[in-house]
Amino acid sequence: MKKFILHLLLTVILYPLVGQDYCGTVMPESYKQHLMKKDRTHLQSSSRVLRQIPIQYHIVGDDDGNGYFTLRELISLHCDLNANFVGADIEFYLYDDVRYINNDEWYVFPGFNAGDQLMNANNVNNVCNVYITEDPAGVCGYAYFPGSGPNGGGIVLNKGCSGFYSTTLSHEMGHYLGLPHTFATIGGIEFVDGSNCSNSGDLFCDTPADFLDYRWSCPYIGSQTDPNGDLYTSVLDETLFMSYSMDNCQNKFSVMQESDMNNTVLSGRPYLLNHTVPVYTNLDTPKLNSPIASINTISSQQTILEWDPVPGAEFYHVLVTHFSNPFLYDFDLFVTGTSIALDELLPGVTYRWKVKPITKANVCADYSKEETFVTSVIKADVTLTPPNCSGNLNGEIEIIPTSGKAPFFYEWSNGWFANPAFSLSSGNYDVTITDSDGNQVILNYDLIEPAALVVDVVVDDNNAVANVLGGIPPYTYLWSDGSSSNTLLNVGPGNYVVNITDANGCSASKGFVISSIGDIAIDKNLINVYPNPVHRDDFIIDVAITNSDEYLLEIINIDGKVIYSSIENLTPDAYKFEISSNELSSGLYFVSLKSAHSSTVGRFTVIR
């Protein structure tokens, strides 16, 4: 069974609302008319169909990516939203990864036009789009009613009004699903005695009369009366999310409000239901493996956090902090695997960390038990010199300590005690550094040699092409006949060798044989290319055929790459092939015309 647990308010945290309007949502006149005509006689029933709604969260920062709403607060916000809508039989799940937007004009904007531009540019179709930014038009949040708003509408939240224990998202989601404020005057002012509740106020008869259209603390102790002289204090319900009472007063929707929202999902926003809903999975608490308190040689430059996988988890929320303030974290990250490498910690500092498993349907599992570790005071720069060629023993690692107390002592995993360590092969190396105060740190480095040079020669009749893998490009070629490109063309039978040298001076060679061409006769009719050199867009290949056959016409660049290829069935005659040079850069090219019984090669030059 699913459980959405509402945070217990042990310490009330009130986000600043001075000079901040609470809700900027405006109900269109057309929607007011819709509500006035709506049948509510069935809304007292608590029998509802489960509705599952996808939310796409967008977190807005400034142009430089500063000021993001934290993932920790987002998780709390989403969990509280689900807890607040349990009674309405409505659940919310993550549609896709959180999307980050860096834009000053959308980070703080004075009017709603900028918010409309934000939605027009970024809304994901057929889901509930929720944006969290620094200051949306000077309000805590706003939403668009069904059938209104740009590009399908959505919800915009002020991050300062959306932190832990806030109800702003629940309030705005109520609007998004068709609810008015409890102090609305649709059809007129609702009386305290409720006698006109079905056609006045917010039109819900199980939400008492409310006139307070400003933020108020509970309980209300004023003396305001309705038109009949009855005191509002006798009926005001500060627990309703759609009121303007302070967040710590609110904890529910009324039964009629819950039923109305449930119905509105189907009638007003049916597209939200056209998705494959992720399966809810109960998630175990992850076990943290490393680092833990017993380890004191952790490098602040190479800290790797590792934990056991949790069955069913799609990703994990990782929190790391050295702050005593429980609301401040150095790292607040979503991670898809079961480890993460951190390289920006402080030396000689105690850190705490914990991990929560997450799925798109369940972000409310428990965090792991918190573990602590202390980073070493020793920091170091490093110069890595890998072996220049595969198999060589000329790699080197030099450590340059930048903190800690000299002199330093080094012990390498291969038995070396020197710095730098030299004559190294490719591989992974640990080094334990000890300073004169006895502080230690363990650092790990990879020396990665280039892949071995591998040469393959493809022989086609009296032509050969050298293909090279590995090493470090660019490569130089030297054939046994003195040629220096990667292609050997139109040579006679015999034994050949090609030597390849890469940019590091590593070399490899490959021998091959071009066999006798036997009965294959060379067509003595030369290929004529004109104009040659080629300057214009088109050029002509002129050939004379003496034997009927199927011919392969190819244009090959100096590197042996086939640029143009065509199969032609030709009979004895003179042929002209008009070819575009648009795709040819300056250089030397070869024209090859061959069949099973003949082969002819010509040359031409392109000059741009």
Image (cartoon, rainbow, N blue to C red):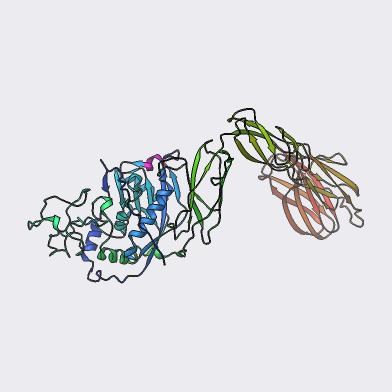
Location of the N terminus by quadrant is bottom left
Q: How far across and down, in percent of the image, does residue 14 sit? A: 30, 46
In the image shown, does 355 or 166 lie closer to the viewer? 355
Residue at x-position 40% and y-position 49%: 73
* Residue 355 against residue 395 in the figure, above or below: below
In the image shown, does 91 or 477 lie closer to the viewer? 91
Left or right: where 192 falls relative to 577: left
Residue 25 visible in image = no
How many numbered marks have been drawn onto this rendered protein structure? 0
Q: How far across and down, in percent of the image, does residue 486 sit? A: 79, 44
* Residue 90 against residue 398 in the figure, above or below: below
Q: How far across and down, in percent of the image, does residue 584 sit? A: 69, 44
- Single out the residue that lies furthest toward the top: 406
Q: Quadrant of residue 431?
A: top right
In the image shown, does 285 or 249 lie closer to the viewer? 285
Main secondary structure along the magenta-highlighted residues: helix
In magenta stretch: residue 44 = no
Residue at x-position 58% and y-position 34%: 379
In magenta stretch: residue 104 = yes
Q: How far across and down, in percent of the image, does residue 496 sit? A: 88, 46
* Residue 555 against residue 431 in the figure, above or below: below
Q: Quadrant of residue 531?
A: top right
Left or right: where 67 falls relative to 538: left
* Residue 250 against residue 499 in the figure, above or below: below
Left or right: where 41 falls relative to 96: left
- Single out the residue that lies furthest toward the left: 229
Magenta stretch in the rendered image: 103-107
Location of the C terminus by quadrant is top right
